[in-house]
Image (tube, coloured by chain):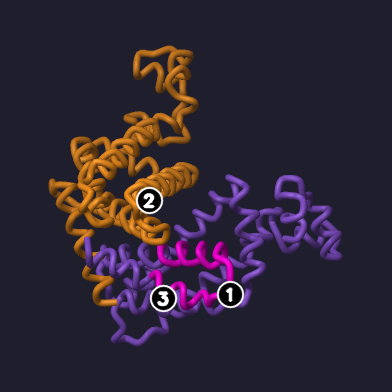
Chain colours: A purple, B orange
Amino acid sequence: MELYVERGFEQTTVAEIAQRAGLTARTFFRYFADKREVLFAGSVLLQEHIVGALDAASDSASPMEAISAALDAAAAVLGERREYSRQRQSVIAANAELQERELIKMASLSVALADGLRRRGVSDTNASLAAEAGVAVFRVAFERWVSEPGDRDLSQIMRESLDQLKALTAAG
Amino acid sequence: MELYVERGFEQTTVAEIAQRAGLTARTFFRYFADKREVLFAGSVLLQEHIVGALDAASDSASPMEAISAALDAAAAVLGERREYSRQRQSVIAANAELQERELIKMASLSVALADGLRRRGVSDTNASLAAEAGVAVFRVAFERWVSEPGDRDLSQIMRESLDQLKALTAAG
């Protein structure tokens, strides 16, 4: 990640990443399929963590309350990694291919959240809408968190954004 | 499009598409960069149409009311092309690369709608949230429209979905 920030994603080779990490290129490829995977390896675990929090939400929670619990879980993990998250975001923002990969991960998160809501008995359309709304809040709040100065809490920004979405739809 | 449905997207060649359309391959490439573009050529025009409707919404419209006007405009265009939309959706659903391209077009629509809302004086975060919510409604409603039996109006499904999102966030 340091190398991506210093030299740009395109200019960094796997050999350089491996060297910086004290690995051989061969060992690198045991952990990552390619140099993009360094940036996305955590996404699968994060998604599992988020969906786990959705599943663990109380039975009486409304769909958006369950989504809110999932967002809290995301914020708890990512909130610890602000500097890393900022760097990662700047690397992704500079590369169209990485942006596409990030879009795909977000779409996959939305599908997983919608599936989780369906398991809770939420109707098809409501599950999809609530999941998409949750991912929208996640993206907008994350973007704000990495770009705004100061040191505000990610979970606080997530909750604020969710409230803003609520106010927006209520006024529409 | 007929060919994609009959034979699958991967199996169809540009030569076959051109032949079916009564064009030479050379003429085909004057209109389309590649065979994927046949499916996405309309997306740019559709996006302009949708953003135009957002811009034309009354000054007093709330952000989600302006988004709703934009969705109505999308429904008016797509609503005329139900059979085509169904076929297109089934071709895209069967091919990962096309799905990615569709995700990118949706992300681009979201950015364009957020920009349009900012031009109306909506704050950064609210513009992004309302645009993402609008695209979420668009996607979910479109999906329902192409998959449900019967012949319901797309604009009606869009409005219903928007109301459902409102009810979901209000209960959250």
Q: Residues within 10 Å of mark 1 (few under 14, many from 20)?
A: few
SS for callout 3: helix
Residue occupied by mark 1:
A151
Q: Residues within 10 Å of mark 3 (few under 14, many from 20)?
A: some
Under mark 2, the amino acid is Arg
Residue occupied by mark 3:
A159
* Quarter of the rendering occupied by the N terminus of chain A: bottom right
SS for callout 2: helix
Q: Residue at 37%, 40% (x, y): give it.
A: B91
What residue range appears in magenta?
Answer: A136-161
Under mark 1, the amino acid is Asp
Q: How many numbered badges does the structure rendering display?
A: 3
Q: Residue at 31%, 86% (x, y): give it.
A: A59
Q: What x and y, as percent, mark residue B56?
A: 24, 41
Chain ID, mark 1: A
- Give the answer, above or below, for where B53 lies relative to A139: above
Under mark 3, the amino acid is Arg
Rounded to the nearest whole Å, what is the CA distance between mark 1 and mark 2?
A: 26 Å
Q: From the viewer's perspective, is B80 left or right of B40? A: left
Q: Residue at 27%, 49% (x, y): give it.
A: B142
Q: What x and y, as percent, mark residue A136?
A: 41, 62
The one nearer the camera, A50 or B126, is B126
Residue occupied by mark 2:
B118
The one nearer the camera, B120 or A164, is B120
**CB contact under 8 Å: marks 3 and 1:** no
